[in-house]
Amino acid sequence: MKHPQQTSGLRVDVKELQGSPGSSETLDRTVGTPADFATVLIGIAEHSDLTLALRLDSVHEGVLATGTASAEVTGQCGRCLDPIGYPLTVDVVQLFSWPEKAEAGDADADEEEVRTVEEDLTVDLEPVLRDTMIPALPFTPVCREDCPGLCAQCGFRMEDDPEHAHEQIDPRFAELEKLKSQLES
């Protein structure tokens, strides 16, 4: 197995694989994470390490990239707003069609987006990683499953005092409360 030449960032040169179905190259590298690999509360910081362990196989249709991508996720708990962080590893499986195959059209093209090898015989891994890693992030991240969060009325951290509460009188019963106090006096 050869190692593909690195171009810039997440672009990988696949010239050696063209016209050689059955040949493969390994891609083991750490690159800086592009911008906006995140949701509102959690994500992968821009320029942080994004580790790729991929195998690029030349197949008749194009280049098949398989392997894993790993990075450190950082953000805030959606309940208490404490900082959280953990490692994330996702599986990557993507076929990049040769330009001439993509132009010829494919019946499967209607079902999903077809990614292609660029005219300069490189593949851009950024859109694939973005489409794989961002959906793997939790919609509402939590520091732990039983995190009590913050008080909805005053923002007090409920973990510091689980008995914290506010007396709430249902406004529908406010008039009855007044009537009760009048009757008692």
Image (spheres, rainbow, N blue to C red):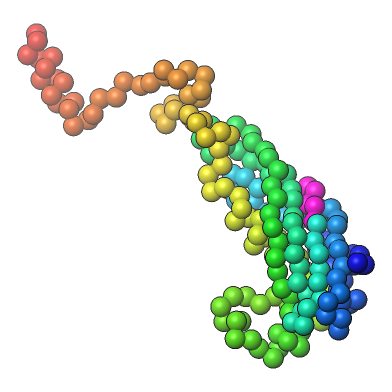
Query: Residue farthest to the front?
Result: 22
Q: Is residue 185 above or below residue 156?
A: above
Q: Residue at x 55, y 37 (%)?
A: 142
The question of residue 13 being in magenta is answered with no
Q: Residue at x 18, y 26 (%)?
A: 174
Q: Quadrant of the N terminus?
A: bottom right
Query: Residue farthest to the top?
Result: 185
- Give the image location of residue 26, x and y in percent: 86, 63
Q: Residue at x 76, y 88 (%)?
A: 100
Magenta region: which residues? 45-52
Quarter occupied by residue 131: bottom right
Q: Nearer the viewer, residue 145 or 171?
A: 145
Q: Nearer the viewer, residue 62 or 174?
A: 62
Tally the numbered discs: 0
Q: Residue at x 51, y 23 (%)?
A: 159
- Give the image location of residue 163, x and y in percent: 41, 17
Q: Nearer the viewer, residue 57 or 161?
A: 57
Q: Please indicate, yes or no, whether residue 42 appears anywhere in the rendered image.
A: yes
Q: Quadrant of the C terminus?
A: top left
Quarter occupied by residue 134: bottom right
Q: Is residue 34 above or below residue 175?
A: below
Quarter occupied by residue 68: bottom right
Q: Is residue 171 above or below residue 120?
A: above
Side (left or right) of 159 relative to 109: left
- Give the image location of residue 49, x and y in percent: 80, 48
Q: Please indicate, yes or no, whether residue 7 appears anywhere in the rendered image.
A: no
- Give the image location of residue 116, x and y in percent: 73, 78
Side (left or right) of 16 relative to 172: right
Query: Residue farthest to the left?
Result: 183
